[in-house]
Amino acid sequence: MKKLVQLAFASLLVIACQTNEKPTVSSKALSAEEKIDSTHIKQFFNTALTEGKSYEWLRDLTQNIGGRLSGSPEAAKSVVWGEKVMKEVGLDSVWLQPVMVPHWVRGEKEEAHYTVNGQKKDVAICALGFSVATPKSGVTAEVIEVKSLDEAEKLGDQMKGKIVFFNRPFDDTLINTFQAYGGCVGQRVFGAAVCGKYGAKGVIVRSMTNSIDDFPHTGTMSYRDLPKEQYIPTAAISSKAAENLSADLKKNPNLKFYFKQSCETLPDAPSFNVVGEIRGSETPENIIVVGGHLDSWDLGEGAHDDGTGVVQSLEVAYLFKKNGIRPKNTLRVVFFMNEENGTRGAQEYARLAKVNKENHIGGLESDAGGHTPRGFSIDANDGNTKLLQSWKKLLSPYGLHDLDKGGSGADISPLKNETVTLVGYRPDSQRYFDYHHTSRDTFDKVNKRELELGSASMTSIIYLMDKYLYDNTPVKP
Amino acid sequence: MKKLVQLAFASLLVIACQTNEKPTVSSKALSAEEKIDSTHIKQFFNTALTEGKSYEWLRDLTQNIGGRLSGSPEAAKSVVWGEKVMKEVGLDSVWLQPVMVPHWVRGEKEEAHYTVNGQKKDVAICALGFSVATPKSGVTAEVIEVKSLDEAEKLGDQMKGKIVFFNRPFDDTLINTFQAYGGCVGQRVFGAAVCGKYGAKGVIVRSMTNSIDDFPHTGTMSYRDLPKEQYIPTAAISSKAAENLSADLKKNPNLKFYFKQSCETLPDAPSFNVVGEIRGSETPENIIVVGGHLDSWDLGEGAHDDGTGVVQSLEVAYLFKKNGIRPKNTLRVVFFMNEENGTRGAQEYARLAKVNKENHIGGLESDAGGHTPRGFSIDANDGNTKLLQSWKKLLSPYGLHDLDKGGSGADISPLKNETVTLVGYRPDSQRYFDYHHTSRDTFDKVNKRELELGSASMTSIIYLMDKYLYDNTPVKP
């Protein structure tokens, strides 16, 4: 029996032993200065994981306010909320930056269906942001399926009176799902602009996701420079509906598709960026900005897009304060308004920075979801890119291996110039497009530890940027 | 208006540009041979992500069979299922390895409660595997809270007639959650053995998780060499219940806790490992084994633990076949039985390997969940460890950065000797203990792409092991 028990519990010892070394850097490999950095970084992670506030902030923002599209009452509430939480963290100053934002409203719930072999099939659909409404009786027409804007353009007058169905799926072989998004999103944004020109009656687009499911993904669109009389209604249908419709069209090319939506674009509405800062101890005139966007689409709660980015950005300041570290440069936290359909907040922030001759030496944006950290994407000159990449040994113990050149984010990229170092936070991307712009983007999809690890990751790179960019980016005369 | 539209859609261009370079290795950095390897690895990933079978296999195993504790009818069904899917993949041979396994049954649903200030509080509880039942009327006693086995041991006779409550929480500051598990699991496994000795009436243990929630986590325990008359019932309570009980005890140290369970250990039952292989083209006498465990706890569906490991292991063979690659060595897939409470399948597999003088040159186990891939943990001699680490440039484009020395897994570690190279698959660990051994470990918690990326990751390292270990591990005389 004794031996049996020993055998039985061999597996437990294996479990205890199968974990790897602790995620701290071998101290041999570090200089004295790097050891200090390593200690601070560990503190940021410890504090985030044991005394983090981001998860409860996110719960409040997503569950008590919910989706907050620019111009909506919820967006207005989120501004009040943002000012309140920034003040609670005890930033040196907190203020609102007024900005006029687009105000599009969805109206009544959309509907769509078609009939094949006498069977009516309901279609999960949602209007795209900025789309016009259908007539009250809806739009009914035959469907032409295409896979790209080019293919649509070639159809020309053939699409007159038809509904054009853009059905290019994500390329699942791309490991980074944002790349797959980049390869498809054009049909969502410009489909109606191309097809309105040739007299199509409407445009429907396959949802932007790897997943085959029943959830339609909204998102912004543009009629570009079409005259208003050529504007046509456009909507996204779920990926499963797209697969089904495509199959049904092969057997029933003359089926008629019906959809109805009552969205409209109202006059621009007043809103705000929410801004707060910890004043720098040595060169307060140099600014490092960290932010996410406060607005979201209306269908879900705007959790991964971009509630997580908002609360993580504030947690950066919180973790500095909680650990008694005052930045040398001014650390500014910004909750940007209107990233989803206009980036007016970002434009206004950059405009004011220029008018006020502010010197931004660095920026960090979190707008790629709140999943487990993978690293950062760097948009900087070669010298600063190499500097940031030299921190790999300090960051990799926390799973932060990706430090490649790449874009930063829609809200901070208007700050780009020759000297500023812009960084995008890059969590794991696999699950992001399961939720993005849908009713599923809710608080319960965010894991507390993943969120907090993200906050600490962001704080760590901001700490390093504050310490080392400081000497690297001279103040302009 | 035109300018406004351009401004509005600046953000979209940013989205398209913000993704980093494609995840392929810069061809400059690779030798001719490595370029071939890089191409094959890309093929494995492409096939897994577009024609993978693992997700549907997992749906079938978890939703049509469900939880499958050793000795249960569900475990028996899973053996039949395992043989069937291995044959469908077209392995050269598939067979069953008989093994007698422990047969513990939970009996009726457990219950627990206590009363403070006249208010009855129900407690989410579940018996631990191998625990004895309470008397039919349950156990009611005062509670002593401790944080470790040592602390309990020091109490000695003070615990006589009491329920001992082990309440050491996970250390949330450990980035790898398996480390936190390793630091706590001893109280679950050996709590009753320590306290039974001193006449405690029962042991309750805080659930093994970072999360504060309502789900009790079961798991195996052992009375070690206690005489049977000292066996006492033991169970896990949810982390939230543990927090509440601890708080209530501070104010009401004499409160009485009640719990009842009717579990029992039946005679050992016959079961099987399911084994299949693709015979090696050059040195078929050398074997590389890849596996996960078919049994699971009874509370959920055994999805992350370890349905994902089972289906990923079979997908390794599927991806070899689908890409027309025959391994040089024999590639053996094993669905191990009884990892959770006995590792009898693993012991029997290793015993037969010895009896039959099989030469295992490598092994890979997937038993750490089906989340997004992070890397592998290597248990091998220094030469082979360095060899595997030299593949980093081939693996890192797929997010596989972790290639540290460490354990492999409970099912393959009995194969350990001086020459064999044992590897543990290491996906991201943050969410694993949200589900582990609970009713929440269900199919819907597994993300299709994360699962498939894991299959392809495992196939890639098996491909490299097959190609390069081949020359590195001489067949013993």
Image (cartoon, coloured by chain):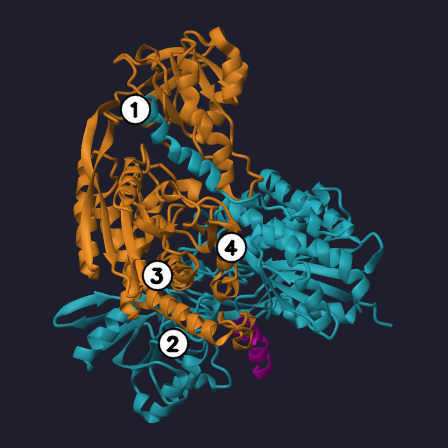
Chain colours: A cyan, B orange
Q: Quadrant of the N terminus of chain B?
A: bottom right
Q: Give the amino acid type for the residue marked by disc 2 in the picture.
A: Pro
Is A347 in front, or is A282? A282
- Residue B196 image point, x, y percent: 39, 13
- Magenta stretch bounds: B1-16
The percent position of residue A40, horizontal first and vertical second, equals 71, 46
Residue B463 visible? The answer is yes
Residue A15: mark in rendering: none
Q: Secondary structure at mark 1?
A: loop
Residue B388 colored in magenta in the image: no
Seen as rendered, the residue at the extreme left is A118
Q: Residues within 10 Å of mark 1 (few under 14, many from 20)?
A: many
Q: Which residue is mark 1?
A: B110
Query: Label 2, on which residue?
Result: A233
Amino acid bearing label 3: Phe
Foreground: disc 2 or disc 3: 3
Q: Is residue B8 magenta?
A: yes
First in sequence: mark 2 or mark 3?
3
Crowding at label 4, few (<14), some or many (≥20) Cα neighbours within 10 Å?
A: few
Residue at numbered disc 3: A215
State whether discs 4 and 3 lie on one chain. Answer: no
Residue on which the image places disc 4: B383
Q: Is residue B235 above or below residue A439?
A: above
Residues at marks 1 and 4, common chain? yes
Determine the CA span between mark 2 and mark 4. Answer: 64 Å
